[in-house]
Image (tube, coloured by chain):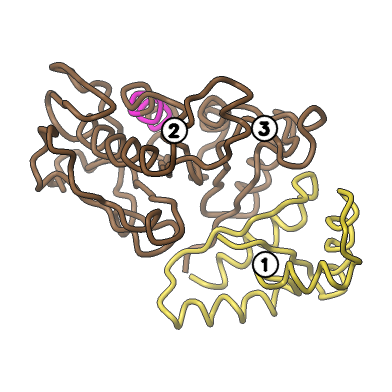
Amino acid sequence: MRVALMIEGQEGVTWEHWCALADACEEHGVDTLFRSDHYISQSNETGNVAHDAWTTLAGLAARTTTLRFGTLVSPATFRLPGLLANAVATVDHISGGRIELGLGAGWMEREHRAYGFPFPETGVRLEMFAEQLEIVHRLWSDERVDFRGRHYTLEDAPAQPKPLQQPHPPLLVGGSGTRGTALPPPASPTSTTRPSSRRTTSRGSARRSRARPSKPDARSASRP
Amino acid sequence: MTGCLIGDTRADALERARQLYERVQRDADFDAWLDGYAHRALIGSIDEVAERLREYERAGCERVMLQHLLHTDLEPVRLIGRLGQQLV
């Protein structure tokens, strides 16, 4: 069994705390450091700092050599999928292939209202989540990407940068309840994605889409 | 993912539980809060937590994320690193 450390980054974890945690993980052989992805503390909004998840992980990735990192989980409501795919691929390069992406529909209404992130009703957020999962996976896997969904449209994206890990960094799906764990939902009627490119399992609250991360140098590994 | 309050000994873990309890204002008293938290957290010595994780492993669980809420306390990071090596 793999054992990871999970830190609630929005609860007052300063940059100095993050460095100390990551250093301690490497010193004591922790497999993976996961962090939440939120912009507001749930216990003390003004007293607890909440640093952005992916920029924090980029900094920690540059600081470390063996520790794996990931989010549990990044809400689809925060970032456009083109930005997210690039950010995670970039941190994958910075880290030398030590990154995992957890993705979910988003649930904490308060942080969305506070900072102006859209927060549509649950069914819509799940659609956004499903489209993001598909787009990120295709941007990491396909040569070029055209996508016409209900929420996102990509026109002839050159799909760069590719992540270092091949076929791609592990994708973890977060959710609970019958709807949150029912992914992947059917593709939207206007999706241009080939059925064979959709994958991920969702029986648990957070499942890897691959058994183990592949070696960064395994670039000739077959596509999923 | 599950909450985790771990120590070299059970007493150490319960001391961490006390610190977590006192971090915010709570309606329940300590024992009632701890009873509730124990339903969504692994609480105990490293050996006790390892035994619980082995049960999960026997049930087919391949990976666990241990939520550590007292993030300035680095001792549990050392113990979680040891757990990972024991359970390989």
Pointer 3 residue:
A40
Quadrant hosting residue A77: top left
| Residue A195 visible, this orientation | yes
Where residue B5 appears, x then y in whole percent?
74, 64
**Label 1: how many residues lie within 10 Å, few (<14), some (14-19) or many (20+)?**
some
Give me the chain that's yellow.
B
Pointer 2 residue:
A120
**In terms of sequence position, does the residue under pointer 2 or pointer 3 come before the other?**
3
Q: In front of the other: label 3 or label 1?
A: 3
The dot on residue B84 is: none
Q: Chain of mark 1?
A: B
Q: Amino acid at mark 3?
A: Ile
Q: In front of the other: label 1 or label 2?
A: 2
Quadrant hosting residue A169: top left
Q: Is residue A85 placed above or below A176 in the rendered structure?
A: above
Dot 2 lies on which element? loop
Residue at image x 65%, y 38%? A9
Q: Is residue A71 placed above or below B29 in the rendered structure?
A: above
The dot on residue B41 is: 1
Give me the chain that's brown.
A
Dot 1 lies on which element? strand
Q: Chain of mark 3?
A: A
Q: CA distance from mark 2 to mark 3?
A: 18 Å
Q: Amino acid at mark 2?
A: Pro
Q: Which residues are magenta?
A: A85-92
Residue at image x 72%, y 72%? B38
Q: Amino acid at mark 1?
A: Ala
